[in-house]
Image (cartoon, grey):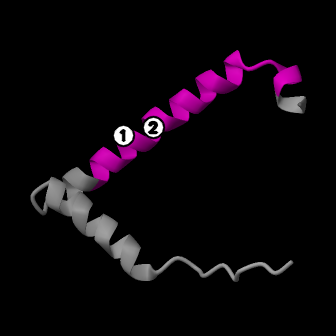
């Protein structure tokens, strides 16, 4: 049984995502950063709510 080597992510993909975020905000870097921070805050809240709603038995398997 042989496993295929896993290649590290290409740096160009990250650049495309950055360019896409900037393009979404018409080149306004501050607006793009503010949106990303808001998204991060929202996802952290969702994670906290999920952790609070999940029982310990569920996480133990």
In percent of the image, x 22 and y 56: which residue is there?
30
Residue 41 placement, left or right of 26 = right
Residue occupying image coordinates x 59% and y 32%:
47
**Above or below, 7 relative to 47:** below
> Is residue 30 part of the magenta span, yes or no?
no
Per the rendering, the mark at residue 2 is none
Magenta stretch prevailing secondary structure = helix
**Could you tell me if the residues under marks 2 and 1 are in contact, i.e. CB atoms within 8 Å?**
yes
* Apparent side of residue 16 relative to residue 44 in the rendered image (left or right): left
- Residue drawn at x 73%, y 20% is 54
Image coordinates of residue 45 in percent, x first then y, are 52, 29
Residue 44, quarter of the rendered image:
top right
Percent position of residue 16, x then y: 30, 71
User: Foreground: 36 or 3?
Assistant: 3
Q: How packed is label 2: few (under 14 Cα within 10 Å), some, or many (20 or more)?
A: few
* Quarter of the rendering occupied by the N terminus: bottom right
Disc number for residue 38: 1
Task: Looking at this view, name the residue that lies furthest to the front.
Answer: 1
Which type of secondary structure does the marked residue at label 1 adopt? helix
Q: What span is colored magenta in the figure?
A: 33-58
Residue 11: % across, % down: 44, 81
| Quadrant for the C terminus in the image | top right
Alpha carbons under labels 2 and 1: distance apart: 5 Å
The image shows residue 37, relative to residue 58, as above or below, that is below
The mark total stands at 2
Where residue 34 appears, as percent x and y from the top left, is 29, 47
Secondary structure under the numbered disc 2 in the rendered image: helix
Crowding around mark 1 (Cα neighbors within 10 Å: few <14, some 14 to 19, many 20+) is few
Per the image, the residue denoted by label 2 is 41
């Amino acid at each position: 049984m042989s496993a295929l080597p896993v290649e590290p992510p290409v740096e160009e993909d990250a650049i495309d995502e950055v360019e896409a975020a900037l393009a979404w905000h018409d080149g306004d870097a501050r607006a793009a950063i503010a949106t990303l921070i808001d998204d991060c805050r929202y996802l952290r809240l969702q994670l906290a709510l999920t952790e609070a709603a999940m029982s310990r038995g569920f996480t133990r398997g």
